[in-house]
Amino acid sequence: MRLKHVKKAEEKINHSTYLIKEPQQYKGNFKSLFQNNNEIHIEIGTGKGLFLLQMAKTYPNINFIGIEKYDSVIVRAIEKIEENPLDNLRFIRMDATNIEEVFDHEINTIYLNFSDPWPKDRHEKRRLTSSVFLKKYDTIFKDKKHIIMKTDNRHLFEYSTISFVKNDYKIDDISLDLHKEQTENIQTEYEIKFSNLGYPIYKIEVSK
Amino acid sequence: MRLKHVKKAEEKINHSTYLIKEPQQYKGNFKSLFQNNNEIHIEIGTGKGLFLLQMAKTYPNINFIGIEKYDSVIVRAIEKIEENPLDNLRFIRMDATNIEEVFDHEINTIYLNFSDPWPKDRHEKRRLTSSVFLKKYDTIFKDKKHIIMKTDNRHLFEYSTISFVKNDYKIDDISLDLHKEQTENIQTEYEIKFSNLGYPIYKIEVSK
């Protein structure tokens, strides 16, 4: 059953024009894919896509790309966009470790929402905010580097804040209990579920 | 009654050898006061002194100075140290805005514990972590600049984190729920009271 589901998901994804099948061929030229010069924002670990679907609807003059490594979740994002087409949103199925092979100085903002905390010390390098990843991002940002991160994981947030600053980012904004703020906030699936339980959501916005 | 109490407090403070009456006379030479070359750590807004009294007992090879502007609270610190004398702890009664007139490149660490949050925007400059104060501290630190801050006030913590980084500090350590960590922590009076209510205590340690 499980295998059958995955196979179906894979088929559905591969037939969609919203999935960029060979992203490397656009490297340095993703604007040709969108056929405009608008900013390009990416979300790494886009899951079922709720956040980017809402962002793309809210900000039609920004192009969005969602990156996700698992067929079984990205298929939900593809299904939703097929139902409600959006010109300014595409998806890539890949592991983020290869991100610098796909983009070249063309990204304006990276969103990291509820990333895997990889709590064990020996897995530090796998965290999407480790120095290893921040150095990869340096090569994909257009000019100003801009990252917006949300998480419910206190340790990942503490770690990431230190890591951003160590890598010369300044902090534009920080919130230690996002849902108590009066600011606009487009939520992820995970965020809705988690904040309903009463736990704080942490957010940090950095740039350099 | 109130006036009588304050007068009594003032008398008690002024008779104590633990109060440095004319701190300016030691400017640049506080080591002569302690008669050794040990590090000098200061707490700004020392209140009733519980934190520094414990720190001074725990770290006999560090000299501590507590700064407090109100007679009515510093008298409690003076009473306690008179009962349990400590060679490595002194107090100064003054407003921290004058701090650069008292110290000159001789402080190793500044502690800011549960400082007044001054929540109104127009009072930003009064916050002990505003750029105004951080620039004053630059002139009192010996070489490496090192600040350790604790607070229960989320907005002050968010503001301070941004301010430290804007002023080129790196973050050595950060905790968004100190009492859930397994680390050693000497508490202030305020901290004991507040954390007993179940609220998180925030801590950040920065240096440059």
Image (tube, coloured by chain):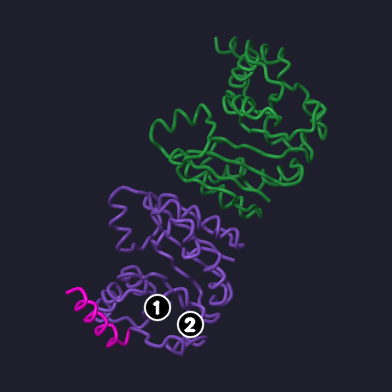
Chain colours: A purple, B green
Residue B78 position, x and y percent, is 64, 17
Q: Residue sitting at 60 percent across and 59 percent down?
A: A166
User: Seen in the image, is B152 located left or right of residue A68?
Assistant: right
Image height check: is A43 above or below B54?
below
Image height check: is A191 above or below A10?
above
Looking at the rendered structure, the secondary structure element under dot 1 is loop
Q: Which residue position is annotated with label 2? A: A102
| Residue A148 in magenta stretch | no
Q: Evaluate if marks 1 and 2 touch, with contact meaning CB atoms under 8 Å apart.
A: yes
Figure disc tally: 2
Q: Which residue position is annotated with label 1? A: A94
Labels 1 and 2 in the same subunit: yes
Parent chain of label 2: A
The stretch of residues the image draws in magenta is: A1-18
Q: Say which amino acid is labelled 1.
A: Met
User: Seen in the image, is A170 located left or right of residue B153?
Assistant: right
Q: Residue sitting at 64 percent across and 12 percent down?
A: B7
- Of B197 and A34, nearer the camera is B197
Which is the main secondary structure of the residues drawn in magenta?
helix
